[in-house]
Every structure is written in structure tokens, then in C-alpha cells.
Image: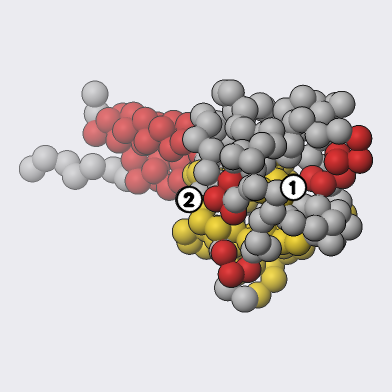
Amino acid sequence: MTRNHTLISIALVIVLALSGAASAGTIIPLTVDVPNTTAPGHGTSIAGLISDTFAYDPADADPWTPAPSQTWSPTSEIYITPSAAGGVATIDFDAVYDTLILDIWGRSDYAGAEATRSQNLTITFYNGAVVTHQVTGWNGVSTKEDDPISYGRYTPPASVLADSVAIGHTSDYLLLAEVRAVSIPEPSTFALLTMSLFGVASIPGRKPK
């Protein structure tokens, strides 16, 4: 095998490995920004926003096996604000990310009007103190009538840079069973990497004297 063939083979192995990692993305380590999060009520906890240890696979169409805890009890791992005036949950990332996706789970054992407590959300992304993106009136978390898991995914524009996200509600109790965030590199990143590696591989080797 020639030097060029060897380098091309190595380049393909690297690109395929990185592409596989990109399909799942980077699961972002999260912490709750307690000072900027409304105190919980009804026996729930702030930790309930991110504490469930369910198997999370962001590359799956249903990114859970099984689903996180989504039922209310005095010891449940969900988060509910204390009043119908709503509130906000702020979650910090461990660094600044782009090409984000945000996965949110609601409550699966609610009744009647409680369905709105994971609906009509305002989602705000921050980079430091700067708002880099905001959506209001987001109803992406499914109700249990449509989906017993009560789950939704929000994807901001790929160019949005953020090191935290605030999820708020102003017209009812805010109810969030679990939150996860992922950064997924754009395919163009890997296309450029592939071309670069093949460019290196195509450089003629030094002829023996």
C-alpha cells in the first residue's frame, strides 16, 4: 500500500468515527442556576429539573429508555412552581455551545387543565448576560392525550451561542419533569474536515534517494 493510500485510509477511519460521534452530539453537563430559578412548591425540588438518571440518547427519535420520572408525589423528581403566577427555571451549561437542541419532559399523570403547565413556554438562551435567542408561546411539549411520555424538543438556529437557558411560564404553574441539552456539530464541519484530510493525504511523498 502506498503512503497516499495509507493516509486516505486513516483519514476515512477518523472521519467515520467523528461522524458517528456527531450523530449523537455532545450531551451538555447541566447545573441549575438556583438564584435565577423560582423556588419550587408542592413537595418538588429544583434538583428535579436535571436529576433523573434515565438512559438518554439524543440521536434516538424517542431519546429515552425508559422515560424519566414524570409523575407527581411528595418525593417526586419533577419541578413545579408554587403558584399559578408561573415562574422560571434557569439552567447553566458547562461552556458556551452552538448547534443546540433542548429536550423537555412534562408531567404524565396530570388531569384536565394541568396540561397547560408544560405549554405556552418562553425559552430564552443566554451567552453571559446577553440574550442570544428567545421563543415565546412554545407548545412543543406534547400532552399525554397525544403522547403518554409528554415530551418535546426545541431546536434554536444553529448560530445561537449560549451558556445557559431559562424556561419560563407566566399564565399557570410551571411544570418540568426533566431537561436535557445537546450540541450537535453541523454536517459541514465534517465535510470540511474530510476535505482537509484528503488534501493532506494527496500531498506527494518524498521520493527515496
State the image coordinates of residue 111 (x, y, percent, origin top left): 86, 33
Q: Which mark is residue 60?
A: none
Q: Which image quadrant for residue 205?
A: top left
Residue at horizontal 69 percent and vertical 37 percent from the top: 72
Residue at horizontal 52 percent and vertical 43 percent from the top: 51
The structure's colour scheme is: secondary structure
Ranked by sequence position, the earlier of labels 1 and 2 is 2
> Considering depth in this image, is 178 or 162 the residue closer to the camera?
178
Q: How many marks?
A: 2
Seen as rendered, the residue at the extreme right is 113
Q: Is residue 141 above or below residue 66?
A: below
Q: Which residue is mark 2?
A: 29
Q: Which is more foreground, mark 1 or mark 2?
A: 1
Q: Is residue 206 above or below residue 11?
A: below
Seen as rendered, the residue at the extreme left is 209
Q: Is residue 177 above or below residue 9?
A: below
Q: Amino acid at mark 1?
A: Leu
Residue at horizontal 65 percent and vertical 61 percent from the top: 39
State the image coordinates of residue 140 (x, y, percent, origin top left): 81, 42
State the image coordinates of residue 161 (x, y, percent, origin top left): 61, 63
> Considering depth in this image, is 83 or 97 the residue closer to the camera?
83
Residue at horizontal 55 percent and vertical 50 percent from the top: 47
Helix, strand or loop at disc 1? strand
Q: Which image quadrant for residue 17?
A: top left
Q: Is residue 66 above or below residue 37?
A: above
Report the quarter where the N terminus lies: top left
> Considering depth in this image, is 202 or 126 the residue closer to the camera?
126
Helix, strand or loop at disc 2? loop
Q: Amino acid at mark 2?
A: Pro
Q: Residues within 10 Å of mark 1 (few under 14, many from 20)?
A: many
Evaluate if marks 1 and 2 touch, with contact meaning CB atoms under 8 Å apart: no
Q: Which residue is mark 1?
A: 175
